[in-house]
Amino acid sequence: MPAVVGIVNVNSIGSGSVFNVGDVYQISPYTMNKTFAGAGSFNTAEQLYVYNHRSNTNTYDRDVVDQPNSFNV
């Protein structure tokens, strides 16, 4: 189905984003990231009490690739 597109203003697009104007069959975003977080990092609440007296985040990773995106086309 044809698409009629008017004025488009794009301020910024991130590295893992997809911008499409018009018709499309399939969109496959391609991005990878790794998150390191210590104890109590992703807690959400109105009142939160976290006591981490001796917390340590191990960021050493022996393998080079965790999950490759080589065949995700």
Image: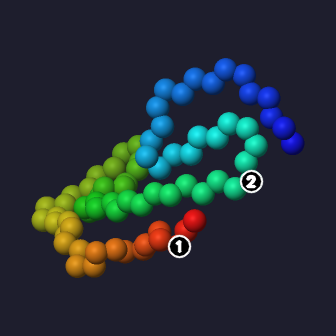
Q: Which mark is residue 71?
A: 1
Label 2 residue SS = loop
Based on the displayed image, in which of its 4 quarters is residue 60 positioned?
bottom left
Mark 1, other Cα within 10 Å: few <14 / some 14–19 / many ≥20: few
* Residue 45 position (above or below residue 30): above
Q: Which residue is mark 2?
A: 25
In the image, 13 versus 35, the foreground residue is 13
Label 1 residue SS = loop
Question: Horizontally, is 71 left or right of 15 in the view?
Answer: right
Which residue is at the far right?
Answer: 1
Query: What is the distance, in whole Å, between disc 1 and disc 2 at their CAs?
Result: 19 Å
Mark 2, other Cα within 10 Å: few <14 / some 14–19 / many ≥20: few
Q: Considering the image in quadrants, where does the N terminus appear? A: top right
**Image point (74%, 53%), residue name:** 25
* Residue 17 position (above or below residue 58): above
Which residue is at the far left?
Answer: 54
Residue type beneath disc 2: Tyr
- Work out whether mark 1 precedes mark 2 in sequence or the reverse, and give the earlier one: 2
Q: Considering the image in quadrants, where does the C terminus appear? A: bottom right
User: What percent of the width, then of the height, locates residue 4?
Assistant: 79, 29
* Residue 25 position (above or below residue 36): above
Residue type beneath disc 1: Phe
User: What percent of the width, then of the height, locates residue 68?
Assistant: 43, 72
Based on the displayed image, in which of its 4 quarters is residue 6 positioned?
top right
**Image point (41%, 43%), residue name:** 46
User: What percent of the width, then of the height, locates residue 56?
Assistant: 16, 66
Question: Horizontally, is 31 left or right of 57 in the view?
Answer: right
Question: Horizontally, is 47 left or right of 21 in the view?
Answer: left
Based on the displayed image, in which of its 4 quarters is residue 54 positioned?
bottom left
Which residue is at the far bottom?
Answer: 62
**Image point (64%, 54%), residue name:** 27
Question: Horizontally, is 29 left or right of 25 in the view?
Answer: left
